[in-house]
Amino acid sequence: MFDLKKLCYFLVAINVLVILFNVSFLRNVGDQTYIETTNPTSSETQTPNINIDITPKAPKPIDKDSPYVSVEFEIFGKVQNVFFRKNTQEEASKLGLVGWVFNSKTGTVEGLMQGTPAKVAEMKKWLCETGSPKSTIEKCVFTNEEGKEALTYKQFIVMK
């Protein structure tokens, strides 16, 4: 009969050895990323035949005939701990927009909104000029704006 506890310790020890002797990391070359494996006992670096394409995809141009628009946003300033997300959700829902909003680790508020072009434009103005009553908005950045044939979300939510 085998001892399950000893087997677990053995497997952990094997994993530690694998980590110690094969340090993997990503290396960017131009617009491609390679995974490199370095063997600490050798001064050679081996680059296996693994190629990851990380070229950013260009957003679809906004089609004047698209019924909806989708846009990501990031709001800078005093926007955390001032009910900015809650107020954003309320305003977006009032305008009939869908999407999400959350506090980033860098102190900004990020989100994505979708809706008719006129309502999205109205929300952009609100995000940059109004916000929550206790917020101080320093900068608004809108990215990845594209036309949509249908909405991806059903409501506007606050993500934790």
Image (cartoon, rainbow, N blue to C red):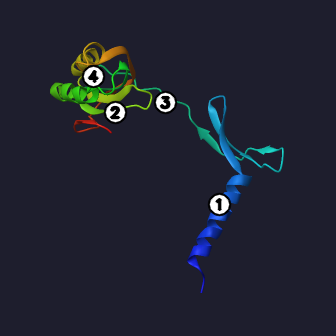
Q: Are marks 2 and 4 in contact (CB under 8 Å)?
A: no
Q: Quadrant of residue 61?
A: top left
Q: Secondary structure at mark 4?
A: loop
* 32 or 78: nearer the viewer: 78
Quickly name the residue at label 4.
65
Quadrant for residue 9, please give it. Answer: bottom right
Identify the residue position indicated by label 3 in the image: 57
Residue 67 visible in the shown view: no
Marks 3 and 2, how far apart at CA: 24 Å
Residue lying farthest bottom? 1
Query: Mark 3 or 2, which is nearer the eye?
Result: 2
Of tags 4 and 3, the one toward the viewer is 3
Q: Specify few, some or many for label 4: CA neighbours under 10 Å numbering under 14, 14-19, or 20 or more.
A: few
Left or right placement of residue 68 versus residue 145 in this view: left
Secondary structure under the numbered disc 1 in the rendered image: helix
Quadrant containing the C terminus in the rendered view: top left
Query: Is tag 1's residue or tag 3's residue first in the polypeptide sequence?
Result: 1
Q: CA distance from mark 2 to mark 1?
A: 36 Å
Query: In this figure, which residue is indicated by the disc labeled 2?
Result: 102
How far apart are the alpha carbons under marks 4 and 3? Answer: 22 Å
Q: Which of the two labelled residues, at mark 3 and mark 2, occupies the earlier sequence position?
A: 3
Across and down, in percent, residue 62 comes to: 35, 21
In the image, 70: left or right of 39?
Answer: left
Q: Which residue corresponds to the image point at 17% horizontal and 24% vertical from the top-left?
A: 95
Which residue is identified by label 1?
A: 15
Q: Earlier in the sequence, mark 2 or mark 1?
A: 1
Q: Which amino acid type is shown beneath numbered disc 3?
A: Lys
